Amino acid sequence: MVQIHAPSDAAIRHLAEVLRAGGLVAVPTETVYGLAANGLDAVACQRIFAAKDRPADDPLILHLLEAEQVTRIAHWSEAGQRLADAFWPGPLTLVLEKLEIVPDVVTAGLGSVAVRVPAHPVIRRLLEACDLPLAAPSANPFGYVSPTCVEHVVEGLGGRIEHVLDGGPCEVGLESTIVDLRDPSRPVLLRPGGITAEALEQVLGVSLARASIAQREAGPQTAPGQLSRHYSPRTRIHLHEKLPDELVARPAGVEALLFLTRPSVEEAPTHWRWLSDTGSLEQAASRLFATLRELDRAGFEAIHAELAPQSGLGVALNDRLRRAANQD
Ligand code: TXA
Ligand code: MG
């Protein structure tokens, strides 16, 4: 049976012991909930892969309390320090050359390791109490929409894990931005996220090259018949730059409309949803995953979703919408 722990001092102490003993704990971060284990314990990390049904070739992120601890697990650089000063603690993950101490299971045998210093006060208290790097991928079965509150974690992994630490809803709501910084003179954006490319480029003083790990995160690509099970929402999503008038004029039916911003109508029809009340992309990002789950449960046959402007946080928002819409 899964236990949900309020973040009391006693619970944090207890869960730090669980982690030290090789157990798993689902933890809140400012981006999404993570499924954590001792990142230096190969057997414990193996349990993360089993609980998530995650393929062994998909490496994990190590979470640290402080940027100063990076040199215990990876090679550091001046560019890394500048990014850390600007964005840590926060939703930025750096891929660095790893040191020997990091188990192969964490990095899927790669010579690099992904590192992040999270901002959420609850995971920070846990990191301090256990004094370990915590390996933590998003706390969802592999390929599903990431969890942004305790209920989502329990929905996806409730039958497979024993402990969830409650830190409330996640403020950012999209996974961290990942930058490959193995060659500090040529940083590569691997995944758009809570920190925008524009903000990173300003601090680095160079433009980011782009590569994508979206394919890997989407799930196994081999057996088409099994694919749908690796995607959530199950409901088919159609994307639009702007929702066409013809769709907006339709009465309620089997297809939902997902606006970026609340439309200015007195009373919205029951098949309409929106991600932000005022047009704030931050609010839209924080509500995206919960809204997709709600629409999935509501049983619509399709969702017509409006894309965000393709800049700033809109890039990450559109990336997640496209992945959710991608059925092949
Ligand atoms: O916001 C986040 O990043 C959340 C919270 C829990 O911190 N974590 C998260 O983890 O989204 P996960 O495992 O769902 O996504 C991590 C991504 C994966 O696509 C993985 O392939 C990539 O990071 N990754 C990890 N290590 C890597 C490495 N050494 N090189 C390239 N990509 C790596
Ligand atoms: Mg994930």
Image (spheres, rainbow, N blue to C red):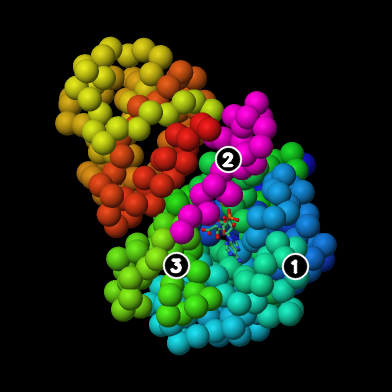
Q: Would you say the residues marked 3 and 1 are in contact, meaning their CB atoms lie under 8 Å apart?
A: no
**SS for tag 1?**
helix
Quick one: 82 or 136, which is closer to the camera? 82
**Residue neighbourhood size for the residue with mark 2, other residues' Cα within 10 Å, grouped as few (<14), some (14–19), many (≥20):** many
The x and y percentages for residue 100 are 73, 80
Residue 130 is tagged as none
The x and y percentages for residue 15 are 72, 62
**First in sequence: mark 3 vs mark 1:** 1
Amino acid, disc 3: Val
**SS for tag 3?**
strand
Q: Is residue 303 left or right of residue 123?
A: left
Query: Is residue 45 positioned above or below 20 on the image?
Result: above
**Residues shaded magenta:** 211-232
**Residue neighbourhood size for the residue with mark 3, other residues' Cα within 10 Å, grouped as few (<14), some (14–19), many (≥20):** many
**SS for tag 2?**
loop
Report the residue marked by disc 2. 144
Mark 3 vs mark 1, CA separation in Å: 23 Å
Query: Is residue 237 positioned above or below 271 on the image?
Result: below
Q: Is label 3 within 8 A of ligand 1 (CB to nearest ligand atom)? A: no
Mark 2 vs mark 3, CA separation in Å: 25 Å
Query: Is residue 205 positioned above or below 199 on the image?
Result: below
Report the residue marked by disc 3. 188
Q: Would you say the residues marked 2 and 1 are in contact, meaning their CB atoms lie under 8 Å apart?
A: no
**First in sequence: mark 2 vs mark 3:** 2
The x and y percentages for residue 117 are 53, 72
Q: Quadrant of the N terminus?
A: top right
Residue 104 is tagged as 1
**First in sequence: mark 2 vs mark 1:** 1
